[in-house]
Image (cartoon, grey):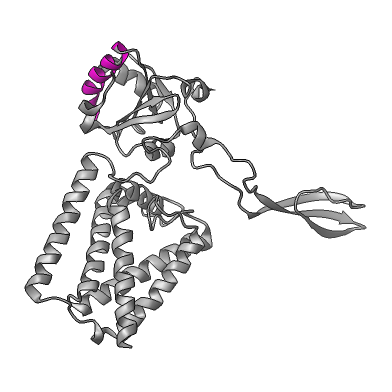
Amino acid sequence: MKYLVGFVRIFVGVLFIISGFIKLNDPVGFSFKLEEYFSQGVLDLPFLTPYALAISILVVIIEVMVGVMLILGYKRKITVWTLIAMIVFFTFLTFYSAYFNKVTDCGCFGDAIKLTPWESFTKDVVLLVLILILYIGRKYITPFLKPHTITAFLLASLLICIGYVYYVLNHLPVIDFRPYEIGKNIEEGMSVPEGAPKAIFEYKWKFNVGGEEEIYTTTGDYPTVDGEFIDVETNEIQAGYEPPVHDFTIEQEGQDFAASLLQDPMLVMVIAYDLRKSDLEVFSKIKLMADEALKNGFKVIGMSASGPDQTALLKEKYDLNFDFYFTDETTLKTIVRSNPGVLVLEKGTIKQKVHYNDLEDLNFE
């Protein structure tokens, strides 16, 4: 039991640290996931939505610190009970998401590792079993280091977490796991490679045959039945390949200009997914940045999910000399964790991407 607890202790501790660090690298992204859970139709807790970012930061710091405490053997009762409380809550959440098909990605490992709802639930069940082993054998969780050293180590870990999250909130994630990282080509990300698996659907055809209702099941073909067709029920039994970049459009007046704009060799995108939540004062700096880009031969466009009335008012107020296009809000949130943020592209390839605090880092030469 002693050796089993020792192994599980290290395994669970490292897993919590890795999971927490991935989300700590992108707390804004994790807050978007929490907003999904808080929304109507899922947990129906909309009053928590304004606090999603604060909750995400608190949760991920606790997740990392509990992992560190477990490995160091610090206050084993508090540590183990905290682990039990967290894993029971996460197991309920992932089961709820999987069973009712509410949230398709739990966000357990951010954008680094995508898990289906049932995979997330299975992972949490395994972790629950391992943590119960730790509870049963908690007397074997002993400190590795002297008390003063452990305290210093924990304090240093907490300060690193706080400093790291402060940095990524005021700049961008240090590690970008999304398909819009610098160096990626958006058009290539939208393409489906040859031989990629296609979705398989099961069709249950309902017919009236001789006055009785009969069901015929196929995977696509219309069945040859001597009867009157009533209805058909379609279910996806195997998901097909989904390209990493999807739902990407650059629309204006109902027309999608993505294909042509992504061929531009010198394109600057100013992205603000929701102008109501944007730091609008930044647009005075955006104006200067856009003027410099235009002076150097770049095409500048704005991309937002806000309506044309809002974008027109913003353009007039700050004398912006570029037009706004409509793009899906979720897509814009995925592209850059800054509202607003700026990208520089060369024929669809992302060359530069910055937070609004780092506009001076852009190079248009």
Give coordinates of residue 348: x percent, y percent. Answer: 45, 27
Q: Main secondary structure of the magenta part?
A: helix
Q: In this view, does 191 lie to the left or right of 268?
A: right
* Residue 14 visible in the current orientation: yes
Residue furthest left in the image: 148
Name the residue at 50% across, 22% down. Answer: 257
Give coordinates of residue 262: x percent, y percent. Answer: 47, 24
Q: Is residue 38 left or right of residue 25?
A: right
Based on the displayed image, in which of its 4 quarters is residue 44 positioned? bottom left
Based on the displayed image, in which of its 4 quarters is residue 91 positioned? bottom left
Q: Which of 130 and 184 is in front in this view?
A: 184
Task: Please count the marks in the image.
Answer: 0
Based on the displayed image, in which of its 4 quarters is residue 320 positioned? top left
* Residue 85 visible in the current orientation: no
- The image shows residue 41, relative to residue 140, as above or below, that is above
Give coordinates of residue 10: x percent, y percent. Answer: 29, 73
Whether residue 290 appears in magenta in the rendering, the answer is yes
**From which residue to which does the magenta span run?**
279-295
- The image shows residue 5, relative to residue 125, as above or below, that is below
Q: In this view, does 79 lie to the left or right of 96?
A: left
Give coordinates of residue 120: x percent, y percent. Answer: 45, 63
**Which quadrant, please, contains the C terminus?**
top left
- The image shows residue 240, relative to residue 258, as above or below, that is below
Name the residue at 31% across, 53% down. Answer: 23
Name the residue at 49% across, 29% down. Answer: 249
